[in-house]
Image (cartoon, rainbow, N blue to C red):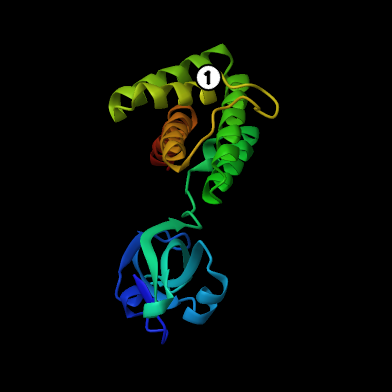
Amino acid sequence: MDILHNNDCMSIVDRCFSIKCPHCGTQSNLSAVSIPRYEMLVRYKPERVVIGYRCDSCNDAVCLRFKTGYFAVASGKINISENYEEIENASVSFEFSFLPEGIRDDFKEALTAYTCGCYNAFAAMCRRTIQSTATDLGATGKDKVKRQLYDLKEIAQIDDELFDVLNQIIVDGHDGAHPHLPPIDKERAEVLLLLMEDVMHQLYVRKGQLQKAEILRQQAIKAKKEP
């Protein structure tokens, strides 16, 4: 993608990107609406630039960060890499109503950190969530978490290195400020998110949904018996 000396940026406008919108959660195309000016880029020569887009589904603003390629000032052209970095992640929805209060608060904070792209903080809060779960369920809670981790390894076919990282975070992580947890990038965070959602669903949501369904069934039976 190029920005020309006369601020012709049609190569950027014509380049279509599709992401999951951080605002509406829809997989949507983006339209470029705010592009850096040529003369400002020549003046400051930034290594990275932000381009403003509109979500074609909800019309809200979405920003993507790009690396600048080269400054060919003699020919009046600045190259912008097509590889982008999402500044905001889409919010993660989850059925929190079946989670105990302390666990719910910890997991909500974990998901907030994930949405903000703070992946090490996300990992630390996931560890805290698992600690709260173990306290709530007792010794069996940690065993169930371990089983979910091994199931994920088989189903998702994750490699041994990533499995060891997840095991350190979820099972063997340290208390307090978690100074020894392994660093987490976006790709690892995505797998950790999948694991945490599965753990919370299996330990709390599924049980809560079944109990709710049974209560509704009993109420329906009682209503039929009443004259």
Q: Is 86 or 20 nearer to us in this picture?
A: 86
Is 16 placed above or below 129 here?
A: below
Asked if residue 159 shows in the view, the reply is yes
Q: Is 150 or 68 nearer to us in this picture?
A: 68
What residue is drawn where x is 40% and y is 24%? 161
Name the residue that disc number 1 marks: 171
User: Where, quadrant-wise, is the C terminus in this rendering?
Assistant: top left
Asked if residue 56 shows in the view, the reply is no
**Which residue is situated farthest in the top direction here?**
139
Q: With 87 as the anchor, is 9 left or right in this view?
A: left
Q: Is 50 or 57 nearer to us in this picture?
A: 50
Mark 1: which amino acid? Val
Is 57 placed above or below 204 here?
A: below
> Whole-percent x and y of residue 192?
45, 34
Q: With 37 as the anchor, is 178 left or right in this view?
A: right
Q: Is 82 or 151 nearer to us in this picture?
A: 82
Residue 113: quadrant of the picture: top right
User: Where, quadrant-wise, is the N terminus in this rendering?
Assistant: bottom left
**Which residue is situated farthest in the bottom direction here?**
6
What residue is drawn where x is 37% and y is 21%? 160
**Which residue is situated farthest in the right direction here?**
176
> Whole-percent x and y of residue 144?
46, 18
Is 157 placed above or below 64 here?
A: above
What residue is drawn where x is 54% and y is 78%? 40
- What SS does tag 1 mark? loop
Is 216 placed above or below 44 here?
A: above
> Whole-percent x and y of residue 221?
39, 36
